[in-house]
Image (tube, rainbow, N blue to C red):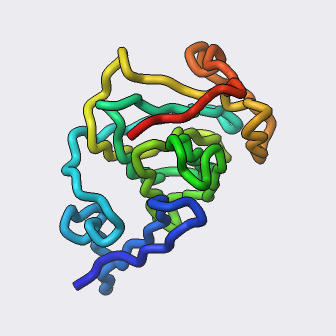
Amino acid sequence: MNNFIYTATKLKGLYLITPKPKTDSRGYFERLYCIEEFKEVGLKKPLCNINRSFTKQKGTIRGLHFQHPPFQEVKIIICLKGIIYDVAVDIRKNSPTFLQWHSEILDSKSRKIFLIPEGFAHGFQAMENDVELLYLHTNFYNKEYESGINCKDPMLNIQWPLNVTQVSERDKNHKFISHDFKGVDL
């Protein structure tokens, strides 16, 4: 039985996933991840890390983050509490959608899941206070291979819905994309 509805976006490999909960008078039970079922959308690697973040202030942006090969990763994003504006940017070298981005509103009520493939930068803006996210990763974090793009990069022109209230020092220091940026070679 398939426990998910997969909705493809305009960017190859980027999916919005809707779990199909089993409900009764007690409430519901819902699967968040299944390696066998996620193979339908091209996910073949097992999970390596599961992380949770808490963002206190509405308007805060985290990102845009990615890892270079060989530590590139698929990220599966689930909003446990609150609402976020979630963004994925295609930075795959030679991709027909190179430097295009796609956004989704994720919240704890709709319980939708964002599957972000390798070769994408990811970031989000908290749409309310006290937001919690669950991140599922297919590769280990490696500081030497981490990188990012400035969330205010004019070449991307991401339209963040709220005034930006907070960005970490690390994320503020991410460079803008230069005209000779060729992307991530997978």
Where is residue 104, by image quadrant? bottom right
Q: Is residue 73 visible?
A: yes
Decide: is 111 above or below 124. Answer: below
| Quarter that holds the C terminus | top left
Decide: is 118 above or below 181. Answer: below
- Residue located 45% across and 42% down the image: 119
Q: Nearer the viewer, residue 119 or 32?
A: 119
Q: Where residue 14 sits in the image (x, y, percent)?
A: 48, 59
Q: Nearer the viewer, residue 18 or 147?
A: 147
Q: Where residue 111 sits in the image (x, y, percent)?
A: 46, 65
- Residue located 61% across and 53% down the image: 97
Q: Is residue 26 visible?
A: no
Q: How many marks?
A: 0
Q: Where residue 40 sits in the image (x, y, percent)?
A: 30, 72
Q: Where residue 71 sits in the image (x, y, percent)?
A: 31, 31
Where is residue 170, by image quadrant? top right
Q: Left or right: where does residue 177 sit relative to residue 121?
A: right
- Residue located 73% across and 28% down the image: 165
Q: Nearer the viewer, residue 19 or 6?
A: 6
Where is residue 172, by image quadrant? top right
| Quarter that holds the N terminus | bottom left
Decide: is 176 above or below 33. Answer: above
Q: Nearer the viewer, residue 130 or 146?
A: 146
